[in-house]
Amino acid sequence: MKTRSARTFDPAGVMFGVLVPLVVAALGLVLAHLWQGRLPDQVATHFSGTEPDDLADPLSNTWTLAIVIVLVGGGCSAVASLARVLLIMRRTMLIIGLTVVGMIGVLQIATLTRELDLTSGQSVTIPGWAIAAGTVVGFAGGLFGASRLRDHRERVVATCVPHTDLPRCSAELPLVVRVGASRVAGITVMVVSLAAAALTCYLSGSLWPIFLFVPLTILTLSLLRFTVHIDQDGLYVSSLGMAAFDYDIDEITGASVRTVNPAKDFGGWGLRVKGRGNYAVATETGPAAFVTFANGDRLTIGSDAAEKIAGTLNTLTAGTRNSAVD
């Protein structure tokens, strides 16, 4: 039995991933036209450190930045509009894309504001605060937009009871298991990021690079740490408080336990995709729950609690199917 999504595009994804970058790009163009009489003939287009080292016509520069916003930021965030693409991929791309859009958009407007009524853009300095503010605004907007996305993938209902050879166990529900990078690994990521931010701050002579590295660190850690939640409704794997994978109990065909090596089996650690419908939360070498679904998807979850995860899913699934038959 199949239940197909009626949507090809996610409305929230279209709004945040497509319309927002277009609006930000258009806003820069509108302001440049409105302020054309107050801007110098040549505005700063590139900076070496904090000083401008290249100048150009205001309108041509604004059009260039608008194209960059749409193609780079919007190109990333537009993935969020595709309703049947893997949900966590759509959310991650939206956050990255809108962070870029916010940073460039706010920086552009702040720079234009500084150049109002100047005779030349040669004297303007880069507004570091605008880079920081734009990054924070873009990242926050990306997080909010990501929370509004919904999973419109095809859902297929399974009919067979999991094979009797598969593990079974009785666990107190909900079963919540945290998987992913260890505390040491998480601290290592933060230390490396902090060191890179400190070096960049030193070279630029400003504190604004910190605001670039904070969302980057949060996003990196979110792809290395997950929470597995199992209850009567199904299997829910989340990151940053949002669904990475969300499967109904009716979709599960069975779960087994196997040993995985993230580097060898999936080409790396964290959230991995190896072929169509083959996903993994590959965060450690060792036992992993291997879950299969009626639509052909496969999900590998590396965890010391793999036996409990697989056993709980099989027990819940078998109970649901047997109750339906009765």
Image (cartoon, rainbow, N blue to C red):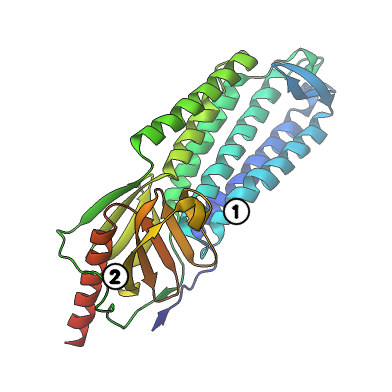
The residue labelled by disc 2 is 249
Quarter where residue 45 is shown: top right
Q: Residues within 10 Å of mark 1 (few under 14, many from 20)?
A: many
Sequence order check: which comes first, mark 2 or mark 1? 1
Give the Cα separation between the discs numbered 2 and 1.
Answer: 31 Å
Quarter where residue 36 is shown: top right
Say what amino acid the circle numbered 1 marks. Answer: Ala
Expressed as whole percent of the image width and height from the top left, the position of residue 140 reads: 47, 37
Quarter of the image with the C terminus is bottom left
- Residue at the spot x=76%, y=12% of the render? 123
The residue labelled by disc 1 is 78
Can residue 12 be seen by looking at this rendering? no
- Residue at the spot x=49%, y=67% of the render? 277
Q: Label 1, secondary structure: give it.
A: helix
Say what amino acid the circle numbered 2 marks. Answer: Ile
Q: Nearer the viewer, residue 156 or 29?
A: 156
